[in-house]
Image (spheres, helix red, strand yellow):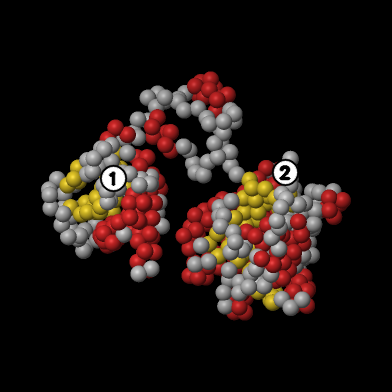
Amino acid sequence: TPRVLSGSRREMSDIRFDGRVVIVTGSGAGLGRAYAIGFARRGAKVVVNDLGQASVRGEGKGDTRPASTVVEEIRAFGGEAVANFDSVVDGDKIVKTAIDTYGRVDVVVNNAGILRDVSFGKMTDHDWDLVYQVHLLGSKATTQAAWPYMRDQKYGRVIFVTSTAGIYGNFGQANYSAMKTALHGLSLTLSKEGQKRNILVNTLVPTSGSRMTESVMPKAMVDAMKPEYVAPLVWYLSSENNTETGQMYDAGGGFYAKTRWERSRGYLHPGSKVMSVEDVAENFSKIVDFTDPEYPKGGANIKKILENLGISGAGRRNPRGATAKTSAELEFPSDIESSAVFKQIRDGIATNVDLAKEVASKSNKNFQFCINGGSKPAYFLMDLKSSPPKCAYSANPFEGCDVSISLSDSDFMDMRNGKLDAMSAFMQGKLSIEGDLMAAQGFGEALTELRVSFDKAQSKL
């Protein structure tokens, strides 16, 4: 049973969109209209996009009246809005309307959609392609056109709209279900790519009465499930107040909830023996047992797998600080870009000792980086065990390190700039690791936190 919240209630006027420009696709009626009007009432400048087709099957000549009518409604109460009649496949044209009219774009709600319901055996390529074009390609096109503006202004909110058919499946909607599921995958990836620039991306699973749900819901339910019950969650997720990204939310009829993946604890076969199909059969009840589930944020449990295969490197840890083979700590080299990153950390530690200790205490490991790409390999030590921590360069390898990591200068800079994560680099063979692999997973975050912390400290001087 859902919890009923009591106590103080924030007024809607507390959450505003003054100065923000919002695009809502498919906003000539139903849910999209409710979203657009609500954004405008809270101060947003709204691009009301609707192709104006009479049929939810994506058929018929476009009609400008739906979008124009919503714009008139908004202007009637003093709001700001402009109509756009392009197909979402031409998402760049929709974004151009926002830029030409208001000079920016802050929020994109990918609401437009059609249905071509038919059982899978009777579904034509045309049925499949039309749904793909509007739902998946259209959402991609509109969001991708807005992305550079959001990235440059370091602010953006994107909502992808999936459905219960996409999450759970529904008879006669193979095309629709496939595209709606794909949209959540797109949302998850963009949430990772956008987060460092304050572009937050989430997925909505709405349940509401509309032209598109008339075919799958009783009329009484269509009439009762008003779009106004869904819209408040869209407004919140699109606001500055929201800090969540990469999540999925249900909304409808006054019920709001967060949906997440669940995985069974599974069965881990001894690493020394390859599993046979008979072993699978024998342990299948363990594989499907959800008695004590996990809520994963990534793929297979890498830590379990590595430990099971006996390559966690736990035995290589050294309780003392690392030392170079030679006593000389040379001036940082100038022929590789990554040298400047380590130099910044070294200088930051010297001027922000207490801050460096605080960050280092979260890891308590020492890392050696062998960076290739200069005239010869360069060895950098980031020792988070010492007090205070230290960062040093040597022409020779350091000894006694918990983790030794080798990669190219360009790959290191991609990791530093958020274009490549450590696990992906490892899996792609761009990065090799000796020592404690579990500790290695966190070195990118440690580097980033030190650099960002020092930048903030410097800006206050």
Q: Picture coordinates of residue 267 (x, y %)?
A: 50, 27
Q: Picture coordinates of residue 84 (x, y %)?
A: 68, 73
Q: Left or right of 64: which side holds 93?
A: left
- Label 1 neighbourhood size at 10 Å, few (<14), some (14-19), many (20+)? many
Q: Which residue is drawn at 87% across and 51% down?
A: 220
- Count of residue discs: 2
**Where is mark 1, residue-wise?**
385
Q: Which residue is drawn at 56% across and 55% down?
A: 245
Q: Which badge, 1 or 2, is on the more N-terminal residue?
A: 2
Give SS at disc 2.
loop
Question: Label 1, label 2: how many angstroms apart (C-alpha)?
Answer: 47 Å
Q: Left or right of 54: which side holds 85?
A: left
Q: Left or right of 442: which side holds 61?
A: right
Residue 59 in sight here: no
Q: Picture coordinates of residue 327 (x, y %)?
A: 12, 49
- In terms of depth relative to the viewer, which is nearer, 53 or 405? 405
Viewport quadrant of the C terminus: bottom left
- In terms of depth relative to the viewer, which is nearer, 253 or 72? 253
- In terms of depth relative to the viewer, which is nearer, 317 or 454? 454
Residue 231 in sight here: yes
> Which image quarter: residue 104?
bottom right
Give SS at disc 1.
loop
Residue 218 vertical position relative to residue 434 in the rendered view, above or below: below
Q: Residue at x 48, y 38 (%)?
A: 300
Residue 40 vertical position relative to residue 440 in the rendered view, above or below: below
In the image, what residue type sits under mark 1? Lys
**Where is mark 2, residue-wise?**
2
